[in-house]
Amino acid sequence: MTDIDWDHLRAVATEAMERAYAPYSRYRVGAAALVTDGRVVAGCNVENASYGVGLCAECALVGDLQMSGGGQLVAFVCVNNEGQTIMPCGRCRQLLYEFALPGMLLETVSGIRTIDEVLPDAFGPRDLEDAAR
């Protein structure tokens, strides 16, 4: 995981952000992630007149991941309409955790962090597998 091209991920996230549909907040967001097989997946936010129905860029990214073959996320970055790195909200961190390789890296406003650092003591698929036994 040391050979992650963060500049490329930011460029893909920026391109995704430029396709965002944000007529209400005008706050466009783009996300990009490296997958275990080397693919890069991306997503943008899609707002809705019924505000609670909008989709975060992370949701669109996970859809792209599943539609393009699945896998686990290795590294992730999210940018706003000024190209600045931003943090996923708590809901989106949980969504990313579901599809993350253990130790997935995120570029954050305070540097590179692991998914476990930005969502400590997370509940996820492994917890459900343990409970089923």
Image: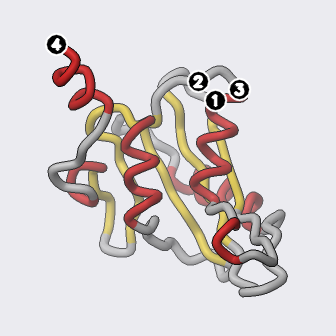
Q: Which residue is mark 4?
A: 133
Numbered disc 3: secondary structure: loop
Q: Quadrant of residue 21?
A: bottom right
Would you say the residues marked 1 and 3 are in contact, meaning their CB atoms lie under 8 Å apart? yes
**How far separated are the C-alphas under marks 2 and 4?**
26 Å
Give whichever of discs 1 and 4 has the lower sequence position: 1
In the rendered view, tell whether residue 2 sits above or below residue 28.
above
Per the model, the C-alpha gap separating discs 1 and 3 is: 5 Å
Q: Nearer the viewer, residue 46 or 52?
A: 52
Q: Where is residue 78 drawn, in percent x and y?
A: 54, 63
Q: Earlier in the sequence, mark 2 or mark 4?
A: 2
Residue assigned mark 3: 68
The quadrant where residue 13 appears? bottom right
Specify whether 98 is left or right of 116.
Answer: right
Q: Disc 2 marks which residue?
A: 70
Q: CA distance from mark 3 to mark 2?
A: 6 Å
Q: Whole-Å distance between the Cαs marked 1 and 4?
A: 27 Å
Residue ID at (45%, 42%): 4
Would you say the residues marked 3 and 2 are in contact, meaning their CB atoms lie under 8 Å apart?
A: yes
Residue at which label 1 appears: 66
Label 4, secondary structure: give it: loop
- Residue at 46 percent of width and 29 percent of height: 72
- Where disc 2 sits, the SS reads loop
Do the residues under discs 3 and 4 have CB atoms within 8 angstroms? Answer: no
Q: Position of residue 127 (x, y in %)?
A: 21, 31
